[in-house]
Image (cartoon, rainbow, N blue to C red):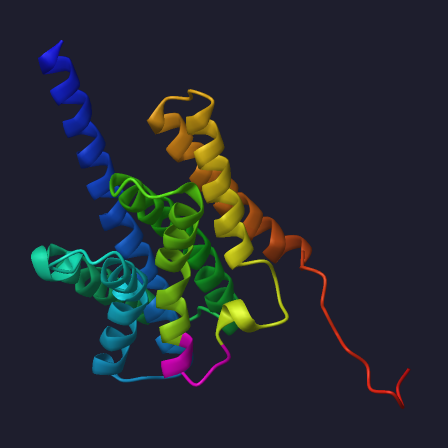
Amino acid sequence: MVRLRFSQKFSKRVILYLLDLVGVAVFAISGALAAGRKRLDLLGVMVIAIVTAIGGGTLRDVLLDRHPVFWIQNPIYLTVILVSAALTLIYVRRRKSLRQSRLVKALLIADAFGLALFAISGAQIAEQENLPGMIVVLMGTITGVAGGVVRDVLLAEIPLILRRSNIYATAAIVGISFYLVLKFMGTPADFATLGGMAAIAGLRLAAIVWDLRLPVFELLDEDES
């Protein structure tokens, strides 16, 4: 029984670690593609890839007072980022016929899966601190969206979560909430994790395809009413 519990805890940690690495890789790809749209040099691409991939997790760790920050404690994250960005550059260079529209589509798809992976892994890290559900949702959302905010600011663009555009941060909130509900109902952790990530990625991709948006709050001037 003790060995079984140890094995379950170990496998859970491994899954969480792998999710972090995959999420870092996917966000690094989205950052590299975004930098490519702005025609940055090699150093610029790497900087944007790094801040996109670790910005959210860094802010999460600072808010949760986790020392040292995850990528300082384990530099393998930086290696994954640099390798992912480099492979992205090589692929795009070889595919010289890759159109701007396809590049934008690839960026949005990569960003959607990165959001799903990071939001759920961030929520699971907050869970380990025995925090209330609302804080878990908040920390997971920050993990998923903060890196993209920093990326957009550095690229002189309005952050994606502030644009009057498709559902983005809302997808993370819904998916993390769904993950917590599944766990509350007794669903095995692995299935709850997959369910939460599928909800986030599915909602984000649906928003892109069908142009789903939240209602806009707008105050009209007196002369417009």
Residue found at the very far bottom of the displayed protein: 223
- Residue 98 located left or right of residue 24: right
Quarter occupied by residue 62: bottom left
Residue 96 in the figure: left or right of residue 168? left
Give coordinates of residue 130: x percent, y percent. Answer: 29, 39
Q: Position of residue 129 (x, y in %)?
A: 25, 43
Instruction: Name which residue lies at 37% across and 44% down.
Output: 120
**Where residue 205 appears, x then y in whole percent?**
55, 51
Residue 49 image position (x, y, % from top left): 28, 69
Report the residue at 91% width, 82% height from top. Answer: 225
Q: Quadrant of residue 125?
A: top left
Q: Which residues are magenta?
A: 152-158
Q: Does the magenta segment cover residue 78?
A: no
The residue positioned 52% from the left and 67% from the top of the image is 161
The foreground one among 10 and 194 is 10
Asked if the magenta segment contains residue 156, the reply would be yes
Relative horizontal placement of residue 11, taking residue 136 as reference (left or right): left
Q: Looking at the picture, does residue 78 appear above or below residue 40?
A: above
Could you say which is closer to the camera, residue 191 or residue 211? Answer: 191
